[in-house]
Amino acid sequence: MKRPHFGLQARFLCAAGGAVLVVIAIVVVLLARQAAAQRELLQASGSVVSQVFDHSVREQGRSLAESLADALVNPLYYSDLDAIGVLVRSTASQKSVSYVLVHDAEGRLIHDGSVEVAGYGRRMRDPLAAGAIGAEALRVQESPMVLEMDLPVRVGDQRIGGLRLGMDLAQLRAQEAEAMSALAQRMGEASRRQLGWAALMLMVLVGFACLMALYVQRTLVRPIRWLGAAARRIEAGDYHLEQQDTGRGDEVGELLHAFGRMSQSIARHDREVRRMAYTDSLTGLTNRLAFREALDHRLLAARAHGQGLALLFIDIDEFKRVNDTLGHEAGDDALLQFAQRIALAVEQDGGEEAMLARFGGDEFVILIGNDAGRVETMATALAKRLVADLEHPLEVQGREIFLGSSIGISLFPEDAADASELLKNGDIAMYQAKLAGKHCFHYYSRALDHAVGRRLHLEQELRGAWERNELQLVYQPIFRTLDRMPVGGEALLRWQHPVLGLVPPSIFIDIAEQSGLIQSLGPKVLRAACMQAAKWPRNAAGEALFVSVNVSPRQLHSGELVAAVEQGLKASGLDASRLHLELTETAVIGDEMLAATLLEKLHRTGVKVWLDDFGTGFSGLSHLRQVPVDGVKIDKSFVADLQRDPDDLALTTAIISMAHALGITAVAEGIEQPAQLELLSERGCDLVQGYWLASPLDPEALVCLLQSPSAAG
């Protein structure tokens, strides 16, 4: 009798069944243990959440109380109920604040944020009032529904009143309950997902066992047929063959392995040759050569099918600064991060036929195609996303750097009929985006050719303007607020072109910044201002006047500013304390460590540094903490509405108070009315300038101003 055959397939099925049972047992045990751990974690999390919320509301209340108390000093001292009301209502409007009360030193209510202030002048009698009135420093009191922050308001050592700020604890408890509910829900969802994954893995395991059972049944015919097909494919130039692995140890098995290794080796060499010829070595993207070939084919197909194409030409803004300040390795790292962000955006928003290439340096090109009615919409959406994504900071060598991108868009067939013209017009549109302020995108238009040509002409004319004596310095006097005495002058550059006439500074300064001319022009302006200031006579009080010179971000980040300052001072003989450098907040944003280092070197020479346009960058205080400056210039946009806008008046007052608290000078610009000067004088602003006091003057007119009797105030 023939013995029953227990073949390989039966053995495999038995082994697979046993493995599935073991896996099921392990999964069940793990899921049970996970459920128990989640219950323990939820109990522990309740206590932690409560502590976190309590700490958060205390810190929030402390921060709100301290900032409001600082802001209340001047209004409370001058009994300015309107200003107090604005500050109180602004704080009380916050969701977590229950009430805000301002009282005098004897505990009488001054303002509660309401219009009527019904309890004005009455002594507060509530249970927490005694503690609040007697608070000599920040005091925290708590009732079942309110957490109160009590803080005295002082002018010097004199206590002029106090502040009571109540935080709503009912809302806090509701948030705690909501957080715990959300946490429990998330844990439940996680548990269900784990169960689903476990079931999926078991299904995969069963499916794999079935496939392996079929694999065991394969005959000798399949590998032989595969060898014949593989030989024909290699002969045709297709080297990508599926690797065969039958587990056989005979000659057929060896031949299968040899064919597989040979096809992989040939395919690898083929890929390497193509990669070297058509791939960018740094980013791995398509290079200029491959893109140009593909673009020609896409244009032919687009003409044949009436399809529209859009080309996006991308240039990284300020990329040269990364190479110049951090080195080329950092530049390569930044390029890789940019390429990854662009590739992700193209993959998600560029459509199935989108193509991305690096053209070299910091330029990337994207080609997208669709029917003529949608290609422009797709290009606009992709460009908006790219501008937003590429503005996010990059982490390079442990530093955060901010760059951004300028994007030009040209369309086929509207803007160009061939590849060269499409690329050229995309480049022109990109250049226009840079002229428009960078960090944006711009579509090509016929008018751009003329605008770019005019811009290039102005740039060419500007290159020799200093040597032709077309550029001159004028000086806007800066006065001391206390006695209206001129104490300095701000150097301003003017361009009188022999043909074009007076070119506005807003135009040619921007051209100098964009083209890099500012880096050669800036030191010349600095030297000329120092030479002129060294000749100025003293004012009526016998004081030597200082000169302030604006510094561009390019000058600051070039690393040559300190040397230019030292050379200007040495050539002119001007005392370092009489030179003030003005830089905007945007000049230090992005790399405050580098800016702080350079400014420290300037301070050691004796030069003073002012932060210009202060308050417009929405982060002025953080800059004052990290970048050493000697003064701040309040932006003229705040000064213009001092009489009409209480918010601008409050902000200006706060800036002056903050500057004095930090021991630095407060300067206001844009004084055009006597009432503005009066308001600034009342708030202790140190220095002022503006057309109402004096317009920009040439050097001779400035000397006349200093020598006139009216210059004494």
Image (tube, grey):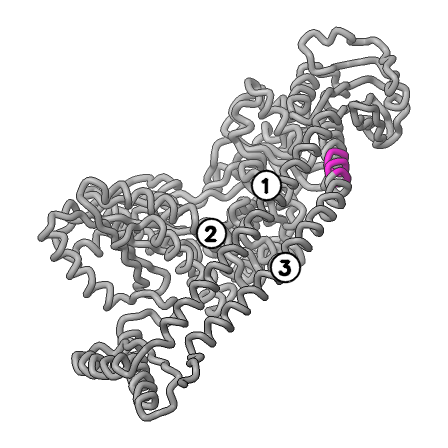
Residue sticking out furthest to the bottom? 251
C-alpha separation, residue under disc 1 versus residue under disc 2: 29 Å
Dot 3 surroundings within 10 Å: few (below 14), some, or many (20 or more)? Answer: few
The residue identified by callout 3 is 601
Residue 659, by quadrant, is top right
Q: Earlier in the sequence, mark 2 or mark 3?
A: 2
In the rendering, which numbered label is found on residue 525?
2
The reply to whether the C-beta atoms of the residues labelled 2 and 3 are less than 8 Å apart is: no
Residue 689, by quadrant, is top right
Report if residue 55 lies within the magenta region.
Answer: yes
Q: Is residue 170 left or right of residue 651?
A: right
Residue occupying image coordinates x 59% and y 66%: 22
Above or below for 428 versus 614: below
- The amino acid at mark 1 is Ser
x and y percentages locating residue 460 in the rendered image? 29, 54
The residue identified by callout 1 is 619
Q: Is residue 491 left or right of residue 59?
A: left
Q: Which residues are magenta?
A: 50-58
Of the pair 39 and 578, the residue shown nearer to us = 39
- The amino acid at mark 2 is Val
